[in-house]
Image (cartoon, rainbow, N blue to C red):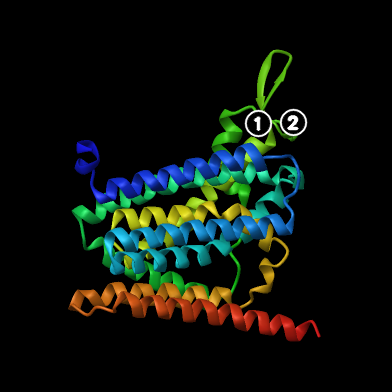
Amino acid sequence: MEIFSLMSVDTWLYLIFLSVLAISLFIDFGVFNKPKEMSYRSAALQSLCWVCIALSFGALIYWKEGKEFALQYVSAYLMEYSLSIDNIFVFVLILAYFKVSSKYYHKVLFYGIIGAVVFRAIFILLGMALVDQFYWILYIFGIVLIYTGYKILVSGQEPEVHPDENIVYKFMKKYFNILPEEGDGKFIIYRDGKKFYSILFLVVGVLASTDLVFAIDSIPAAFAVSQNKMVVLTSNIFAVMGLRAMFYLLMGAVNKFDYLQQGISFVLMFIGFKMLIEIVNWHIPTELSLLIIILMLGSSVIFSLLKNGSSDK
């Protein structure tokens, strides 16, 4: 009992977070990791499960840390989850570029997202260390977010993807013996006593590193919502962990969210503005920030659905 009493609330929350991740990954890898395409029903159920797990953890934060941190967590999670739709679009293009068979989508996405989680965790911890030492970096983040949001709004275009220009792609092509085949779903292939790597291994590296490019925008946005390490880390990782199920759920409909880019751009600009006005000691309450984020993203989704609904008639 003395050991339990010595452990802080944050330590307990981290332990619960890591335990939930470990159990979920074990179930995912042991039960769902089959060489077949995930059904729409299964994708919907898994997406719902990940959202419920993430929100349950938010309820736990509310119980242990209070309302303010819980609202920050939900705001950061909702924002990251919405930004992840851009990731889905890019994942579709990458898998098509390398002509990956649909039955192997589950495997490459599983490992690609695990790699993305590791990269993001490192990125967040480094970012937090910088913010702790140089708080003014947050204001630079604010300017970057406003610029990024404006750029998205003006261009109105989906991100262009050039996997062959990816740094990790070039590195792996140079230093790994990559074979242009899927190797029956295996990452490592042995031929005549020599070790080779399948194209699936290369795709995993490209997926993980590509997600990190998106994190350059989304993680600073999370910092704008909260400077609490646990809130930023857990909300971000829970959102990323639900990416694979969301991929199957939205794979055929990702281009139907015509106004989502605009919604995301307004959210990024709002978060950047919220960060910058704190220079003059103005503060937008977390409850109001969450409401604004929900209204911006919700409106963009509703308008997109209405537009596509009317065009289908």
In the rendering, at what x and y percent does residue 265 appear?
48, 74
Seen from the viewer's position, the closer of residues 84 and 203 is: 84
Task: Give the CA distance from mark 1 to mark 2.
Answer: 7 Å
> In the displayed structure, would residue 158 be above or below residue 92?
below
> In the displayed structure, would residue 160 be above or below residue 244?
below
Secondary structure category for the residue under label 1:
loop
In the rendering, at what x and y percent does residue 113 appear?
55, 47
Q: Quadrant of the N terminus?
A: top left
| Type of amino acid at the residue the image marks with label 1 | Phe
Task: For residue 9, say whether it is visible.
Answer: yes
Residue that protrudes farthest toward the right in the picture:
313
Q: Which mark is residue 183?
A: 2
Viewed as shown, does residue 153 lie left or right of 130? right
Q: Tell me the residue that label 1 is attached to.
A: 187
Picture residue at 33% right of the left edge, 67% below the top: 224
Seen from the viewer's position, the closer of residues 48 and 290 is: 48
The picture quadrant where one finds residue 134 is bottom left
Q: Is disc 1 in contact with disc 2, using a CB cutoff of under 8 Å?
A: yes
Secondary structure category for the residue under label 2:
helix
For disc 2, the neighbor class at 10 Å (few under 14, some 14 to 19, many from 20) is some
In the rendering, at what x and y percent does residue 70 appear?
34, 65
| Type of amino acid at the residue the image marks with label 2 | Gly
Q: How many marks?
A: 2
Residue that protrudes farthest toward the front in the picture:
1
